[in-house]
């Protein structure tokens, strides 16, 4: 039975220079061994399913093709869909915000290095507060101060000295909902509403 993983490409914007199209991205991942690949939005977030092959191996095999067809060659992070669902199930952002919060975010990175500061941690500008880190995921709340919005990606990269990429919690919630909830027959659902 295939297992679902989410692939987060850093600095990918489908259809733009140095990024593949949706079809190129999904085709490259399937050709590299994913039993399925479904892009979610246009920011380089993809759900893949794999059998016996490791998801990292699939992503690594797809990389040369993506570089050839589109020029894309940035960092990539892979997380089990179940890990993201479990994080959301805990409702980690409850009580961490106030009226000044702009967004709740998930930042993905590959490092076993300790963050080096007690959590929750707030940057010097006060526009990023990292509330939790574990399993290659930093959960943050960000603020907009004047015209500037905090960047959890920049903060994680600066502290851990590794590449990272961020998605909003709303994106992750929609992704988990889309790929974990059973699909209902629209005709059946409509009939129940009558």
Image: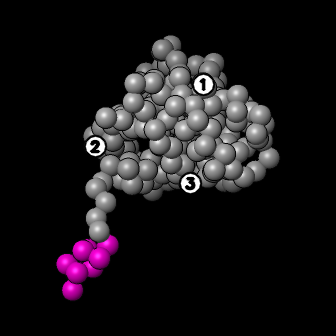
- Quarter of the image for residue 77 reads top right
Q: Residues within 10 Å of mark 2 (few under 14, many from 20)?
A: few
Q: Residue at x 36, y 35 (%)?
A: 2
Q: Is residue 24 left or right of residue 182?
A: right
Magenta includes 193?
yes
Mark 2 or 1, closer to the camera: 1
Measure how far apart labels 3 and 1 are at the Cα level: 22 Å
Q: Which residues are magenta?
A: 186-194
Q: Residue at x 55, y 38 (%)?
A: 30
- Name the element at disc 1: helix
Mark number, residue 41: 3
Q: Nearer the viewer, mark 3 or mark 1?
A: 1
Crowd rating for badge 1 (residues with CA inside 10 Å; few <14, some 14–19, many 20+): some
Q: Which mark is residue 89?
A: 2
Distance between mark 3 and mark 2 Cα atoms: 22 Å
- Residue 115 spot, x, y in % from top left: 50, 19
According to the image, label 1 marks what residue?
60
What predominant SS class does the magenta segment belong to? helix
Which part of the image, by quadrant, shows the N terminus?
top left
Q: Are marks 3 and 2 in contact (CB under 8 Å)?
A: no
Is 144 located above or below residue 29 in the figure?
below
Residue 8 appears at what percent x and percent y?
Answer: 55, 37
Looking at the picture, tell me which residue is in the foreground, 24 or 87.
Answer: 24
Q: Give the mark, 2 or 1, whose residue is nearer the N terminus.
A: 1
Comparing 52 with 77, the one in front is 52
Q: Position of residue 86 (x, y in %)?
A: 30, 37
């Amino acid at each position: 039975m295939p297992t679902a993983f989410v692939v987060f490409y850093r600095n990918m914007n489908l259809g733009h220079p140095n990024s593949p199209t949706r079809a190129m991205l999904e085709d490259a991942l399937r050709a590299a061994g994913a039993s399925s690949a479904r892009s979610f939005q246009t920011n380089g977030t993809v759900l893949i399913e794999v059998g016996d092959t490791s998801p990292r191996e699939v992503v690594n095999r797809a990389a040369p093709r993506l570089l050839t067809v589109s020029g894309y060659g940035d960092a990539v992070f892979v997380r089990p869909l179940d890990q993201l669902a479990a994080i959301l199930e805990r409702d980690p952002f409850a009580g961490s915000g106030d009226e000044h919060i702009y967004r709740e975010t998930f930042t993905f990175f590959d490092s076993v290095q300790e963050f080096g500061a007690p959590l929750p941690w707030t940057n010097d500008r006060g526009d990023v507060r990292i509330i939790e880190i574990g399993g290659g995921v930093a959960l943050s709340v960000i603020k907009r101060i004047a015209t500037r919005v905090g960047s959890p990606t920049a903060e994680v990269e600066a502290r851990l000295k590794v590449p990272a990429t961020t998605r909003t919690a709303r994106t992750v919630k929609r992704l988990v909902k889309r790929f974990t909830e059973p699909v209902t027959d629209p005709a059946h659902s409509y009939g129940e509403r009558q």
